[in-house]
Image: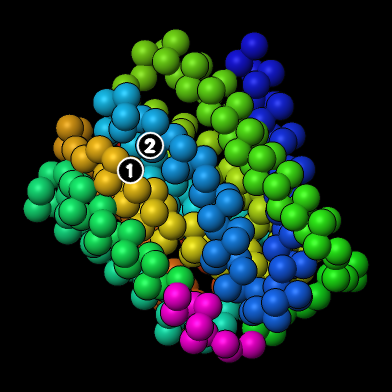
């Protein structure tokens, strides 16, 4: 039964990713908004919905380690696994806004999370308000001031969809990604629990990978349809959203405490390190481009992270 849930989850994620991408492209065309902004807002928010749902429910149920490890693990998986797989399929040309705005905001958000859990061993309601307020400011800045044109390849079937079709694709895509992720998480988590695996290990590996599958589906479909700006923007935006919104909202509902010291002594440093590594990879070996070699490096680091975590 668990394997069936996993298969059904993957199917829903594939369809959901395709539908969500169609709506995102239509929105960017209609509003004349750079696609990387659409990727960092509409797409990343929808694909991060599973992290939000899982973290809030876990914290309410008293599993705060699962809530926090889910976000940290998902951020590592988004860059070390999802971006790596995406780059193995196709290289991505990077825009100036990546290192002037998007990457710095991701690092600031990561630094805030690190500071809060290191000093307080938890993220309280006050810290949650700070995180969510920072997200609000960032979104206002994106929508009002980042008007830089994004040059990327357009798909052959790129066309203006009617409003009702755009809304329908967005709703179906978001529901497909959410439902598929839920099925995948339930099937995988039940299997893990049968093997007697602990709460943090489930969160940092199985649950985080499961909640990152929507990002993988949306990003891979985006590069296959040559919407590469949406792909990269989705991943950076998802990491920002995971910290500022998922942890922010969760901690405002109930404080998120750390009970497993591995989250502080190991996992958080992996997240910070891989997040930082993206910047030099953008300039090396070729300036303003992420290539397949970068994907190999990120994937090897992610495998090393999983090995270190499991052993």
Residue at the image point whose x is 57% and y is 79% from the top? 94
Q: In the picture provided, is 24 more to the left or to the right than 98? A: right
Q: Main secondary structure of the magenta part?
A: helix
Q: Residues within 10 Å of mark 2 (few under 14, many from 20)?
A: many
Count of picture labels: 2
| Residue furthest out toward the right | 157
Residue at the image point whose x is 60% and y is 73% from the top? 36
Of residues 268 and 32, which is closer to you in this image? 32
Position in image of residue 50 (x %, y %): 51, 40
Tell me if residue 267 comes above or below residue 87 in the rendering.
above
Which numbered disc covers residue 167? none
Q: Earlier in the sequence, mark 2 or mark 1?
A: 2
Q: In the rendered image, which quarter is residue 225 located in? A: bottom right
Q: CA distance from mark 2 to mark 1?
A: 5 Å
The reply to whether the magenta stretch includes residue 60 is: no
Of residues 221 and 126, which is closer to you in this image? 126
Tell me if residue 114 comes above or below residue 100 in the rendering.
above
The reply to whether the magenta stretch includes residue 142 is: yes
Residue receiving disc 1: 250
Q: Residues within 10 Å of mark 1 (few under 14, many from 20)?
A: many
Position in image of residue 137 (x %, y %): 37, 72
Which numbered disc covers residue 56? 2
| Residue furthest out toward the left | 119
* First to last magenta residue range: 140-149
Q: In the picture provided, is 203 more to the left or to the right than 45? A: left
Residue at the image point whose x is 65% and y is 83% from the top? 150
Residues tagged 2 and 1 counted as in contact (Cβ below 8 A)? yes
Tell me if residue 105 comes above or below residue 127 in the rendering.
below
């Amino acid at each position: 039964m668990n394997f069936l849930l996993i298969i059904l989850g993957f199917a829903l994620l594939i369809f959901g990713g395709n539908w969500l991408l169609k709506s995102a492209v239509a929105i960017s065309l209609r509003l004349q908004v750079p696609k990387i902004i659409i990727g960092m807002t509409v797409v990343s928010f929808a694909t991060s919905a599973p992290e939000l749902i899982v973290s809030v429910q876990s914290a309410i149920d008293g599993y705060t380690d699962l809530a926090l490890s889910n976000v940290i693990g998902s951020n590592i998986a988004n860059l070390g696994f999802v971006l790596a797989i995406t780059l193995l399929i196709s290289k991505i040309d990077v825009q100036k806004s990546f290192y002037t705005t998007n990457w710095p905001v991701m690092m600031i958000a990561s630094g805030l999370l690190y500071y809060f859990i290191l000093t307080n061993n938890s993220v309280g309601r006050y810290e949650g308000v700070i995180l969510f307020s920072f997200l609000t400011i960032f979104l206002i800045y994106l929508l009002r001031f980042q008007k830089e044109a994004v040059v990327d390849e357009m798909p052959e079937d790129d066309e203006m969809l009617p409003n009702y079709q755009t809304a329908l694709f967005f709703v179906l895509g978001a529901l497909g990604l959410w439902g598929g992720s839920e099925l995948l998480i339930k099937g995988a988590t039940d299997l893990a629990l049968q093997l007697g695996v602990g709460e943090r290990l489930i969160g940092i590996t199985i649950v985080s990978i499961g909640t990152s599958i929507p990002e993988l589906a949306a990003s891979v479909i985006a590069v296959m349809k040559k919407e590469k700006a949406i792909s990269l923007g989705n991943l950076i935006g998802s990491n920002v959203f995971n910290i500022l919104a998922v942890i922010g909202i969760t901690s405002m509902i109930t404080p998120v405490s750390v009970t497993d010291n591995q989250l502080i002594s190991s996992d958080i440093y992996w997240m910070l390190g891989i997040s930082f590594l993206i910047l030099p990879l953008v300039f090396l070996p070729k300036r303003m481009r992420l290539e397949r070699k970068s994907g190999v490096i990120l994937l090897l680091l992610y495998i090393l992270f999983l090995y270190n975590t499991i052993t």
